[in-house]
Image: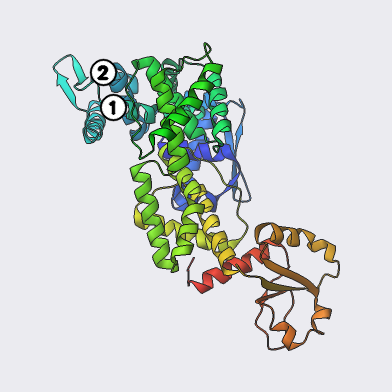
Amino acid sequence: MTSTVKTLLKLLLSGNLEEKDLQKYLDLDLKYIKKNIQLLDNYLVSHNYGYIKKKNETYSVKNKKNDFSKLFSDLSILSKKEREDIICLELLLNKQIKLEELREKLIVSRSTINNDLKRVKDYLEQNQIFLESKSYRGVFLKNLDSQNIKNILCEKIMKLLVGKEFITSYEKNMLDKINILDEKKYYRFYLKIIEKFKLRKSFYVFYAIYSMALIEKLEGKFDYEINLSCEKEEVDKILKIVEEISLDFEPELEITPVFRMFLTGVILKVKKYPLFEPKLIDSFNKFILELESDLKLDLKNKKELIFELKQIFTIGYLNYKYNYLWIRPKVEVSSCLKFTSYIQRMLKKLGIEMFYSDILGISEEVIDFFIREEYSKKNKILCITTNSNFKYYDNIVGYMNTFYPKIKLEIISFLDFDLVNQYEINKYDLIVSEIEILVNVKYKKVRVLNIVTLNEVLINSILEKYKIQG
């Protein structure tokens, strides 16, 4: 089973998807989508797991055993990136590997394992971690005390923990050897931390903390310094609270002084620097500069958009980094999909990789921001309908009051509109109508008035203003 087929399986296990959606998530032509669906179906049937069902261009997995994690753990085929992560973990945890033994376990050729090792060696050397090959004895780590070893171990262990429902048998066996602490107890400890410091819950932050706890248990105590521009009084204040919380969990959990300092650093980073990785900061800054150039952001708008986008952009970046693939609920507004295509092209141009679900989320956040800015004053929108039962439109009014409270929305019947004079009409910033208007009035025609069509009109007004093509 190829890595593409595995990704396809993950997608279909998340929910029913149409061909056009699969194309967006996998970034493949339709003929390759169909080819991979056939390969997946053959695999499921031959291994008695079920089959792929197609209905009206929509695909779903019918799983007989209803055990998705076992399905993945039964797989023995690893992608190039998964093999590199395994070699990296084996080297950093065991300080050495015997390449031939590892090759047999991973079921690959000698040329493949040698190429994998070369890429791992290049990656480690970029992080000032060096290897040494000894004839007939294997490959060894040369510098055993590098802080970068802890950082890379943390990243690789996090990737296994985040994706543990979808890992192969080899990865599962490796995680079982590493995951020697009580994850649930550490999670309760983490919840106490975020409650005390009023932090937003994030499983990435939790798994960063838990992974470092595992590393300390496996590797022994490590040095840690807070490399942030913070006042000593602020650090000491947070450290004192962390120590008090830690005492509540002893002797259940062994929270060492060094680990408390590490936790203090994590809390400070989350509170002060939501974009905590250099590559993440660089990607975000490039994205904001591109938006600023395309959409003519002034300084005020730029600052507000940065504030609103930091969280969702960070999540999208981390989801791709740790291969956390999920399906966003279907978007019904076609103009929103046009804007998503625009954002997708921009990210591709900048070399920023994200899953389609997160690109959708970023697009919705950006377009929502511009709608609020466009109608930031007390703007008036008039909706003309053929339905005389205005109770039907309570959900539209409620939606607009919740998401765009500065917009004053009025709904009238087409019969009442005939009585509105030109002076009154000119007071409205936007008119949306279910019928053709014969008088000389600028308006937007919709087939039926509802939340989706009203959203469509609002989004289209932004697309037209900034001349954005889908």
Q: Which of 106 and 310 is in front in this view?
A: 310
The answer to whether any part of residue 187 appears in the image is: yes
Q: Which residue lies furthest to the left in this view?
A: 135
Q: Give the residue at x 42% y 33%.
A: 233
Where residue 464 appears, as percent x and y from the top left, is 53, 73
Q: Which of 150 and 175 is in front in this view?
A: 150
Q: Nearer the viewer, mark 2 or mark 1?
A: 1
**Residue 268 falls left or right of residue 337:** left
Where residue 451 appears, as percent x and y from the top left, is 70, 61
Question: For the residue labelled by badge 1, is the local secondary structure a helix, a strand or a loop?
Answer: helix
**Can you identify the residue that label 1 sits on?**
147
* Image quarter in which the N terminus is found: top left
Which kind of residue does numbered mark 2 sit on? Lys
**Residue 426 falls left or right of residue 79:** right
Q: Is residue 368 above or below residue 150?
A: below
Dot 2 or dot 1: first in sequence order is 2
**Can you identify the residue that label 2 sits on?**
95
Q: Which of 462 and 83 is in front in this view?
A: 462
Q: Give the residue at x 41% y 19%.
A: 257
Q: Residue furthest top?
A: 251
Q: Residue 180 carries which label?
A: none
